[in-house]
Amino acid sequence: MIKINEHFNKLQASYLFSNIAARIAEFQEQNPQTDIIKLGIGDATRGLPHACVAAMHAAVDEMGEDATFRGYGPEQGYAFLREKIAENDYAARGADIAADEIFISDGAKCDTGNFQEILAADIRVAVPDPVYPVYVDTNVMAGRTGPFHNGRFENIVYMPSTQENNYVPEPPDTDVDLIYLCFPNNPTGATVSRADLKQWVDFARDNRALILYDAAYESFIRDDAIPRSIYEVEGAREVAVEFRSFSKTAGFTGTRCAFTVVPKECRAFDENGDTRYLHPLWNRRHSTKFNGVAYPVQRAAEAVYTPEGQNQVKALIADYMKNADRIRKEMDDLGYSYVGGEHSPYIWIEAQMDSWAFFDMLLNRAGVVCTPGAGFGPCGASCIRLSAFNSYENVDRAMHRIREALQKG
Ligand code: PLP
């Protein structure tokens, strides 16, 4: 008899975005004339940088000729891209990462979700609350959790990220083996200081733990003092894996290219307590289950590192950050507490009421869509997330409408 993986039964249906879509549809039906502005999405809205498009076109032409055609590429990615990443994203910031420690993939979602597969089933996992749901659900699927009660899974250590700790969780006093961190954070938009990140690295070293560091939003950091990579912190090479993506950096959400860094010294332990390096394990997993990112896409990603590509990516990010600044200014004027939006496309607002009630109020009174914080965990129950991924014109209109709606009380 063929049997299912029973752990899937523990998963909670992802009501967040379907629930949002249903409420929008109902509102639109009753108010067909309202032009709804969506500030809920975490998807890029602007076209790809021209340098990337030109590189992709040229690569597609190469694929059409026998002489320059490429079939299967290296599963870990082409050297031309891995070398550019090592040089520009790491060496240039004083982080010591070699090209062959970088694994090119088709997304940070897949990599953050898949990495746990090379780790034991009985490890203790810690995640922030609120959290990017992929970290939790993939561990549920792998059987590392108990059932779901009151918004949380048994056997997962949830680390509250709240106003009290500036949205940066402290290392827990319980035993944990695998720690997910994400900075700049989704959904809060919070960043971490070098000193706080050092505490985490020291904790992982002292407790023989591993940090999975999701830096998908690093390109939104505007202050050089804020670390863009965990490898800017001393001692991280042994205890941290880092995930990055071209999705938000260069609008590749639909094009698909990302990478995972596994330093050669990065270690876990076998059942005897002996050190086992993760690089060969991840290499084995990646090359067994993945057949590489399309050549034209890797050429497009490489173009991000050309001088034109760098200028275009910076301009793209600056445009989104202009939106974020506009949202922050409105929240300041309206007297709301918030975090994020300074080095991140997300602004996490303390709504001071149930997050779904606030969502309904913004939709009904202003025709603006946000994301209710409850969808990211119990600590988000009275917060909402606004996203800067939209045109400035729409963000500005949305802010005028929110002001009017809230001032009506
Ligand atoms: N990590 C975080 C924190 C995200 O918010 C997202 C997408 O929203 C991803 C990873 C996914 O990135 P990718 O498009 O590379 O799969």
Image: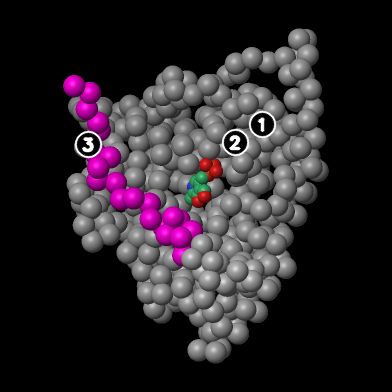
Residue 163 lies in what quarter of the image? bottom left
388 to the left or right of 263 = right
Residue 319 position (above or below residue 310): below
| CB at disc 2 and ligand 1 closer than 8 Å | yes
Q: Determine crowd level at label 3: few under 14, some 14-19, many 20+ residues with C-alpha closer than 10 A.
A: few
Give the x, y percent position of residue 210: 35, 41
The overriding secondary structure of the stretch rendered in magenta is helix
Give the x, y percent position of residue 46: 70, 52
Q: Amino acid at mark 2?
A: Cys
Residue named by callout 1: 297
Q: Secondary structure at mark 2?
A: loop
The mark tally for this picture is 3
Residue 262 position (above or below residue 365): above
9 to the left or right of 218 = left
Q: Secondary structure at mark 1?
A: helix
Residue at far bottom of view: 408
Residue named by callout 2: 257
For the residues carrying marks 3 and 2, which lies nearer the camera in this image? 3
Q: Nearer the viewer, residue 190 or 360?
A: 360
